[in-house]
């Protein structure tokens, strides 16, 4: 029986947590490597400990997240965790910033949220209906050139939910980059239920798990698929 030959692990020039195989920061049952970020950030650890132990919104969020982990680890789906998290923060209104392609899923999620006694408002990413050409993109960058094709509008999604008074916001299927803009402009704590990955059925970690087989290409940037505009 043939066994897979594992390629040698390339040595990192500037190692950090991803190159650590001791994980002493979790249980303190081993030792720290010489490049450990915990040992290099003692002052930062003290400052963040004071922050988490305080009464700010960041402190409340940190403790609520830790409580969800402690009470339900391995028992709740992430969908359920988002609802419990919102309840622990005392939320009354939960906003959903959804990709327009996830609105069917958002409808089901909204029913789940309402069953917990929370108000919910969903805002699709095409809100405002601004054509991509109006923000400086050439018509050829549309998936269907020559037609109205609205750009994603995460800033307006956040504004609508801010104006509504959302206590907690949930991101559902926003594009890479658009998720950043939504979180930046959200006044309420914003967490992620699902991310978009059209190729892997919205499971981006699938590429990591299959990196020795179906997705060997990801290990070398030169093998990434080229832009569909590259040869034009």
Image: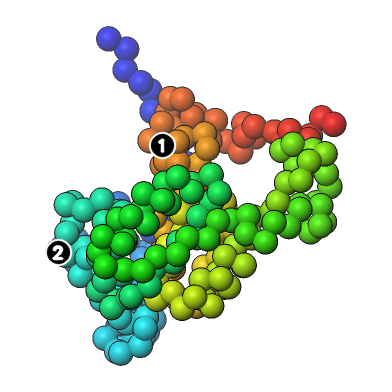
Horizontal relation, residue 232 to residue 56: left or right: right
- Calculate the distance from the C-alpha at mark 1 to the C-alpha at mark 2: 28 Å
Q: Residue at x 37, y 57 (%)?
A: 110
Residue 47's quadrant in the figure?
bottom left
Quadrant showing the C terminus? top right
Q: Residues within 10 Å of mark 1 (few under 14, many from 20)?
A: some
User: Is any atom of residue 21 visible in this view?
Assistant: yes
Q: Secondary structure at mark 2?
A: helix
Horizontal relation, residue 150 to residue 11: left or right: right
Horizontal relation, residue 65 to residue 44: left or right: left
Query: In the image, residue 140 lies at what x, y percent?
Result: 82, 40
Look at discs 1 and 2 and give the one toward the viewer.
2
Name the disc covering residue 71, or none. 2
Q: Secondary structure at mark 1?
A: helix
Relative vertical location of residue 146 with respect to residue 133 in this rendering, above or below: above
Q: Residue furthest top?
A: 1
Image colouring? rainbow
Compare residues 183 and 156 and report the one nearer the observer.
156
Query: In the image, residue 151 lies at what x, y percent?
Result: 69, 53
Q: Residues within 10 Å of mark 2 (few under 14, many from 20)?
A: few
Quadrant showing the N terminus? top left
Name the disc covering residue 206, or none. 1
User: Is any atom of residue 27 visible in this view?
Assistant: no
Query: In the image, residue 118 lies at what x, y percent?
Result: 31, 68
Is there a contact, CB below 8 Å, between mark 1 and mark 2?
no
Query: In the image, residue 156 lies at what x, y percent?
Result: 62, 67
Residue 226's quadrant in the figure?
top right
Q: Residue at x 16, y 65 (%)?
A: 70
Q: Residue at x 45, y 45 (%)?
A: 104
Q: Residue at x 64, y 32 (%)?
A: 225
Name the disc covering residue 3, or none. none
Residue 9's quadrant in the figure?
top left
């Amino acid at each position: 029986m043939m066994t897979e030959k594992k390629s040698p692990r390339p040595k990192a020039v500037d190692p950090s947590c991803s190159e650590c195989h001791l994980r002493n920061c979790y249980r303190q049952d081993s030792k720290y490597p010489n490049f450990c970020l915990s040992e290099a950030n003692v002052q930062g650890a003290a400052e963040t400990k004071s922050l988490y132990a305080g009464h700010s919104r960041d402190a409340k969020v940190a403790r609520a997240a830790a409580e969800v982990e402690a009470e339900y680890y391995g028992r709740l789906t992430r969908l359920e965790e988002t609802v419990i998290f919102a309840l622990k923060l005392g939320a009354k209104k939960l906003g959903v910033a959804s990709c327009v392609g996830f609105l069917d899923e958002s409808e089901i999620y909204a029913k789940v949220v309402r069953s917990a006694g929370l108000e919910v408002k969903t805002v699709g990413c095409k809100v405002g209906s601004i054509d991509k050409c109006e923000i400086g993109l050439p018509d050829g960058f549309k998936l269907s050139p020559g037609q109205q094709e609205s750009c994603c509008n995460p800033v307006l999604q956040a504004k609508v939910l801010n104006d509504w008074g959302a206590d907690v916001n949930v991101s559902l299927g926003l594009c890479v980059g658009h998720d950043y803009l939504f979180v930046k402009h959200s006044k309420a704590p914003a967490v992620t239920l699902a991310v978009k990955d059209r190729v892997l059925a919205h499971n981006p970690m699938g590429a990591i798990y299959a990196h020795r087989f179906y997705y060997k290409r990801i290990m070398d940037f030169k093998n990434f698929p080229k832009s569909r505009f590259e040869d034009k």
